[in-house]
Amino acid sequence: MRHTTPRQYQLVETCLQEKLDNGTTRCHLCPWRCKIGHGQRGFCQAHVNRDGTLYNLSYGILSAIEVGAIEDKPVKHYRPGTRIMSVGSYGCSFRCGGCHNLDISWGVTALDELAKGQSTDAWVAPETLVDAALRAEVQGIAFTYSEPAVWLEYIIDVSQLAHAAGLYTVYVSNSYITDEALELAAPHIDVLCSDIKSLRDDFYQDICKPAKVDQVLHSIKRARELGVHVETRTNIIPGKNDSPDEHYRIACWIRDNLGADSPWHITKFFPIYKLSHLPETDDAMLFSAQDAALRAGLKHVYVYNDKGCDCAQQNSPIDIYLNGSREQIHQLKVCAADCCGDDGVLLKKYEQT
């Protein structure tokens, strides 16, 4: 990355931005391509325009850390049997009604506090995170829980150091990312575990107004072309994406674009948030989807009838993985450049095009 890695919390310039007239900027990290004026933030709420320059609010801010098996991401065909440190921040390009990582993924309150200079969330320098992973004796670092594209600047900085230390990297994503961002990240990412939520535009547009299926599928296929190991997953939600025909068509797309050997992970929906009125997915529906995939010619299809997502579950304090006292780690986060004031904080005032 072009920026100098900060030694304490501060805003970091968004790596893919376009400066427009009248001090506005356009973000090119995801296909929202938000047009953002001074004091405004994009849809993800993690990038803010300060006096004509777009900055990432969440660089180095961690919401969760967990250590576990790579198979839990789920990833089964890359370094099986190894352990990985999973980390998340805040912010997402989607608003899924059944999100199990709501406080982390959307992170509305946390990002508001960052914007106002009132946050006490942990700030972890890239080298500090890599050192923590080495102390934990894991073999890789996964960027998950929140959408990785939102804090791409940090992910690239961490990944470069991780590779230098002999660690691999995993990117767990909705794949709603621009070609520019994907091509910037791909050299530093070993594995993409991506959702294919549906093959219907109306499903995607219910959780992300401008999204189209082809944008997501294009990014997944492009990642493979760029040399990233790709595995895909689908959370089957009763009444939403539970058509056997759709499951067959997803499997055919994977076969034709990623290869018959490419793994597909089928996960169970559990009621939560706006979808709390729906039943959990019947096991028979999961195994029916697996049968459809096998008929389509996929060779590696995995069913999870005990989990729905890659969720932060242990809720162990971040402090236990880091050197330093709790007081040091959770000091008030005010940008070192002193550019975050209440006068510039506005919510959800951006333009889509």
Image (cartoon, grey):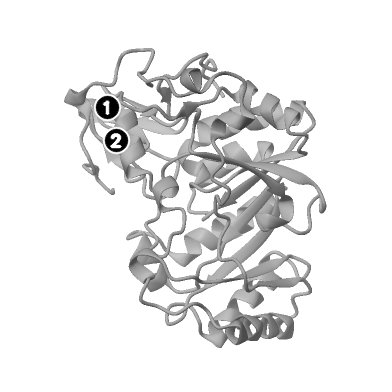
Residue 92 appears in the rendering: no
Q: Mark 2 points at which residue?
A: 112
Residue 165 locus on image (x, y percent): 77, 27
Q: Give the image quarter of residue 209.
A: bottom left
Q: Which quarter of the rendered picture does the N terminus lie within?
A: top right
Residue 160 locus on image (x, y percent): 67, 28
Q: Which residue is drawn at 58% across and 80% down?
A: 247
Amino acid type for the residue under numbered disc 2: Asp
Q: Mark 1 points at which residue?
A: 116
Q: Which residue is drawn at 40% across and 32% down?
A: 17
Residue 175 locus on image (x, y percent): 53, 54
Q: In this view, does 351 lie to the left or right of 307?
A: left
Amino acid type for the residue under numbered disc 1: Lys
Q: Give the image quarter of residue 212.
A: bottom left
Q: What element carries label 1?
A: loop
Residue 128 locus on image (x, y percent): 62, 22
Q: What element carries label 2?
A: helix
Whether pointer 2 and pointer 1 mark residues with C-beta atoms closer than 8 Å, the reply is: yes
Tell me if mark 1 has few (under 14), some (14-19) or many (20+) residues whose alpha carbon lies within 10 angstroms of its own: some
Residue farthest to the left, as pictured:
343
Mark 2 and mark 1: Cα distance apart in space: 6 Å
Q: Is residue 265 left or right of residue 20?
A: right
Query: Which numbered marker is on residue 54?
Result: none
